[in-house]
Image (cartoon, rainbow, N blue to C red):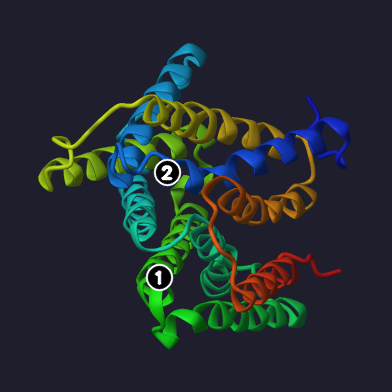
Amino acid sequence: MSTARKPLDGLAAGSMLLLCLCWGMQQVAVKLAASAVSPIMQIGLRSLLAALLVGALMCWRRERFSLRDGRLRAGLVAGALFAGEFLCVSVGLIYTSASHMVVFLYSAPIFTALGLHWRVKGEHLGRAQWGGVGLAFAGIALAFSNGLSGQGEWGRMLLGDALGLLGGLLWAATTIVVRASSLSEASPSQTLLYQLTVASVLLLALGGGTGQWATLQMSPIAWASLLFQGVIVAFASFLAWFWLLRRYLASRLSAFSFLTPLFGVAFGVLLLGEPLDPRFLVGALLVFAGIVLVNLRRA
């Protein structure tokens, strides 16, 4: 089969729209089921479920996996960073809204671009990309401004917003480790298996150590959230993403992915009734614009 990537067609556009809808719903699903299952336990369980599905798929494909192929260390580091990202998301959602979380978490491309600029040859930023970095950081500062004022709920949300931003930084660090290590030559399923397995072990151990197993209540909403996150998001959507990357132009696909935080904000408002402050909205738009500029390809 040819390795040439195609421009987007109707199948790719429809698939990306569906994927962005799923990804934008993640934080809302966690928040919806938080009263029955703590966010840490939700993400630990969903990672375990997805890891089992990825492992089963690799066995069905007869895909080789070895702990002695020189990728174990990088895999463990990537997995630990992945777990740290979702630990920040889990705790952050206790304090802030899902719409805030999705915006700050999806600042990750900015940190990724900066890290790759200094760590990977051929990934240097041009003027437009640096402008995008500046624009995004201005948006982050504006979105944070209500929390910094310390007024009412906005003061309480500052910690959650900061954890969302830290989650984005850890997501970027995970990407950089994968890109700059031996994992860059591994199959997507092997890389995903490392991340999911390490995350499930660390998060479930943390949940057990803090007594969160005892408060577990698997209500219908909790089951729906777990199955959606584990089967649809962490397993099926990432496999679909990798399938698209092998067939279509990555830059065109990435342009669609910017819809994810927009969907996340919309779902938070529609399903959870979360309020939107004008300063946060303007800051979020600046962050989105900065991400678009950072991902522009130079001629």
- Res 30 label: 2
Q: Position of residue 148 (x, y in %)?
A: 43, 85
Residue 231 position in % (x across, y down): 48, 26
Which quadrant holds residue 291?
bottom right
Relative side of 218 to 138, left or right: left
Q: Quadrant of the N terminus?
A: top right
Q: Quadrant of the C terminus?
A: bottom right
Left of 154 or right of it: where is 185?
right
Kindly indicate the quadrant of the structure image that contains residue 196: top left
Question: Who's the residue at 72% across and 65% down the image?
Answer: 295
Q: Give the spatial CA distance, label 1 vs label 2.
A: 17 Å
Q: Camera-side residue: 82 or 211?
A: 211
The residue at the far bottom in this view is 149
Q: Secondary structure at mark 1?
A: helix
- What residue is at 51 percent from the left and 15 percent from the top? 61
SS class, disc 2: helix
Q: Callout 1, which amino acid?
A: Met
Question: How many C-alpha atoms fall within 10 Å of the one at disc 2: few (<14), some, or many (≥20)?
Answer: many
* Image disc number at residue 298: none
Number of marks present in the image shown: 2
Residue 110, placed above or below residue 240:
below
- x and y, in percent, of residue 17 in the image: 74, 40
Q: Is residue 127 above or below residue 116?
A: below
The location of residue 242, given as percent across then percent down, is 63, 36
**Mark 2 or mark 1, which is nearer the start of the sequence?**
2
**Residue at x 43%, y 75% (from the top left corner):** 154
Q: Is residue 65 visible?
A: no
Q: Is residue 85 left or right of residue 235?
A: left
Q: Amino acid at mark 2?
A: Val
Residue holding disc 1: 157
Residue 256 shows in the view: yes
